[in-house]
Image: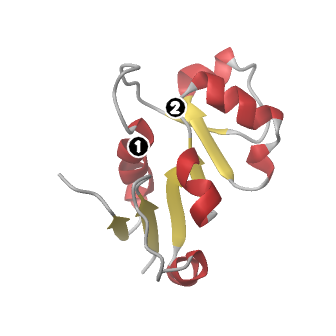
Amino acid sequence: MEISWVLSEDYNDPIVKSEQLKDIGSTWGSWKTWRSWSTDNVLCADNTKAQDLIKRAFHSVCNFYIPQKSYIFLNRPTGVKVFEGDFPDDFTKQEDVIAIQKPSFLQRVMKLQYVQ
């Protein structure tokens, strides 16, 4: 059974370490979670931030996903992956919503710090 962890940008647990999660399965989250958790799969729905991260070659240290519509706008950056879907600019935590859906092909998705 394949497991994937989806980390909310609000998740903060001083006891759990990134390595412990990765020993169990891959990790998904917003670009905001990468610094704390070194997530394997990183999503960014903001064009300006995505462009900045691509300039820094962020996609060379993780699987970096941007919206399909941004891919063309950002000149089809090599090595960057895309996701479908669109949100209004004022929709909060877009990456968290996408991260919950993206690894849905897996048998088990473990979500950390998601409150409805």
Q: Is 31 positioned to the left or the right of 60 in the image? A: left
What residue is pinned by disc 2? 45
Name the residue rendered at 22%, 56% in the picture: 115
Mark 2 vs mark 1, CA separation in Å: 9 Å
Residue 45 position in % (x across, y down):
51, 31
Name the amino acid, label 1.
Ile
- Looking at the image, tell me whether mark 2 or mark 1 is earlier in sequence order: 2
Is the residue 16 above or below the residue 61 in the image?
below
Q: How many marks?
A: 2
The 10 Å Cα crowd at callout 2, few under 14, some 14 to 19, many 20 or more, is many
Name the amino acid, label 2.
Ala
Residue 47 position in % (x across, y down):
60, 23
| Colouring mode (rainbow / by chain / secondary structure / one colour) | secondary structure
8 or 83: nearer the eye? Answer: 8
111 or 79: nearer the eye? Answer: 111
Could you tell me which secondary element the residue under label 2 belongs to? loop
Residue 62 position in % (x across, y down):
70, 55
Location of the N terminus (image quadrant):
bottom left
Name the residue rendered at 40%, 24% in the picture: 86
29 or 102: nearer the eye? Answer: 29
Is the residue 17 above or below the residue 53 in the image?
below
Numbered mark located on residue 98 in the image? 1
Q: Answer whether residue 39 is visible to the viewer in this image.
A: no
Marks 2 and 1 close (CB-CB < 8 Å): yes
Numbered mark located on residue 46 in the image? none
Residue 6 position in % (x across, y down):
42, 61
Is the residue 63 above or below the residue 27 in the image?
above
Name the residue rendered at 58%, 50% in the picture: 42
